[in-house]
């Protein structure tokens, strides 16, 4: 087959979960299908070395600052279509080849509409609905997303395959003391700390996490909370929540952190506090487990599916429950060790090679369904 991949999201310099998925699944698919050819479509040139290029893997760079999917990519599909188009992190174009596969990440905007700006909410719903209904086959990144697609969008269950994320192999425990000390000094983490990783936006439930941390920090005068991530929508809500924290000087806003710093940050923390209101998968939880980092996370959406028995699960709407979880991890070294060991074992089953093999099977099934 000639497999076309919309790789536009994979080339963004600051990758969050969706962009990381787009990059990693594209790389892994190319490795998993040595007898197939690939055409990668970009709306900007990729950085050198990010993705392979060869006689088997060709690039089509189609610069377009706006309306790339419905304009330039559609025109490409009309004039030079691949055998199948895979869209890992975006909407299907209006013009498409007969065989298509789209990945749908989450429908969290239906569960917590107030945590998303109205234009974003409606655009995402229209995009996901269009892609899920038009695609020959759909990849859902969790059983929770699959259930939502069936329940809310009426997508037939037999057209949806759950393919969980993997984690990059460089997410692993870090035991290099000089590296850890240098990271701590550079980021001003001069005391035990909990870590959050993700875009700083309301659906990540940072208001309740901050309120819970404030309770726990009362009688733990050296405890820190480090928030890693770029600013998202509705930043005024985060500023207001920070202003209410009595221990404000012990909350570190680290901003976006480059990939090499993430494993030592995770390895040096007391635990990852990842209390999202809704996640389609929750990649930071998996990456924390791969670093043997204890995880405190929500007992809702996809997160129990990802962490299994390798994390503390609490109600993300209950500030008291979040505070109790933080206290447990802060005070019980044995619990941190046990959760770290369980997480490391569980994370071993989540690889991009496995995800690519499962995704390739979906692509082949979609191609076969349109070429009978």
Image (tube, helix red, strand yellow):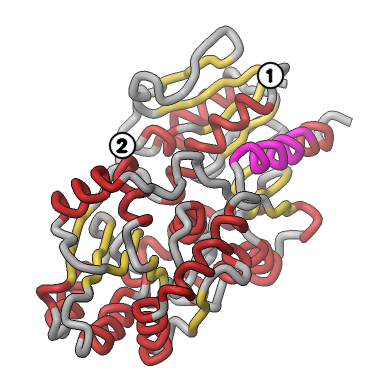
- Give the mark, 2 or 1, whose residue is nearer the N terminus: 2
Q: Residue at x 18, y 71 (%)?
A: 251
Question: Total of numbered circles in the picture?
Answer: 2
Q: CA distance from mark 2 to mark 1?
A: 28 Å
Residue 142: image x %, image y %?
63, 59
Q: Is residue 178 positioned above or below 309 on the image?
A: above
Q: Would residue 124 be seen by someone viewing this image from the given angle?
A: no
The residue to which callout 2 is attached is 13
**Which residue lies most toward the right here?**
372
Residue placed most toward the observer, 40 or 29: 29
The residue to which callout 1 is attached is 34
Q: Residue at x 55, y 42 (%)?
A: 88
Is 29 one of the magenta-colored residues?
no
Callout 1: SS? loop
Residue placed most toward the observer, 105 or 341: 341
Q: Residue at x 57, y 19 (%)?
A: 79
Question: Which quarter of the image is occupied by the C terminus?
Answer: top right
Residue 130: image x %, image y %?
59, 52
Is 363 one of the magenta-colored residues?
yes
Picture disc at residue 206? none
Q: Would residue 259 be seen by someone viewing this image from the given angle?
A: yes
Q: Is residue 333 positioned above or below 281 on the image?
A: below
Q: Find residue 364 and report its image quarter.
A: top right
Residue 316: image x %, image y %?
44, 81
Residue placed most toward the observer, 137 or 205: 205
In the image, the segment drawn in magenta is 352-364
Q: Find residue 224 and report its image quarter.
A: bottom left
């Amino acid at each position: 087959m000639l497999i076309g991949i919309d790789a536009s999201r994979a080339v963004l310099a600051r990758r969050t979960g969706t962009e990381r998925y787009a990059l990693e699944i594209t790389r892994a698919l190319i490795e998993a299908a040595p007898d197939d050819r690939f055409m990668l479509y970009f709306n900007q040139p990729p950085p050198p070395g990010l993705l392979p290029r060869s006689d088997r893997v060709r690039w089509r760079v189609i610069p377009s600052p706006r309306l790339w999917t419905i304009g330039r990519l559609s025109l490409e599909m009309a004039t030079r279509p691949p055998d199948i188009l895979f869209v890992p992190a975006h909407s299907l174009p209006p013009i498409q080849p007969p065989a298509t596969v789209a990945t749908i990440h989450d429908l969290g905007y239906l569960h917590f509409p107030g945590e998303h700006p109205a234009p974003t909410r409606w655009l995402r719903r229209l995009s996901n609905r269009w892609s899920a209904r038009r695609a020959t086959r759909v990849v859902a990144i969790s059983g929770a997303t699959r259930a939502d697609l069936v329940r809310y969008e009426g997508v037939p269950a037999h057209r949806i395959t759950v393919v969980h994320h993997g984690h990059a192999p460089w997410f692993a425990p870090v035991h290099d003391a000089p590296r850890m000390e240098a990271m701590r000094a550079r980021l001003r983490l001069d005391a035990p700390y909990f870590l959050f990783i993700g875009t700083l936006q309301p659906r990540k439930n940072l208001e309740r996490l901050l309120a819970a941390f404030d309770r726990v920090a009362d009688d733990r005068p050296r405890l820190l909370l480090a928030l890693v991530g770029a600013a998202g929508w509705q930043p005024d809500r985060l500023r207001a929540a920070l202003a209410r924290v009595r221990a404000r000087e012990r909350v570190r806003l680290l901003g976006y952190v480059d990939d090499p710093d993430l494993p030592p940050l995770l390895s040096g923390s007391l635990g990852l506090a990842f209390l999202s209101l809704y996640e389609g998968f929750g990649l930071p939880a998996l990456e924390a487990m791969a670093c043997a980092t204890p995880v405190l996370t929500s007992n809702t959406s996809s997160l129990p599916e990802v962490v299994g028995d390798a994390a503390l699960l609490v109600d993300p709407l209950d500030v008291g429950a979040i505070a109790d979880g933080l206290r447990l991890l802060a005070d019980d070294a044995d619990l941190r060790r046990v959760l770290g060991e369980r997480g490391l074992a569980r994370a071993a089953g989540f690889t991009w090679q496995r995800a690519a093999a499962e995704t390739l099977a979906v692509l082949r099934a979609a191609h076969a369904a349109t070429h009978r």
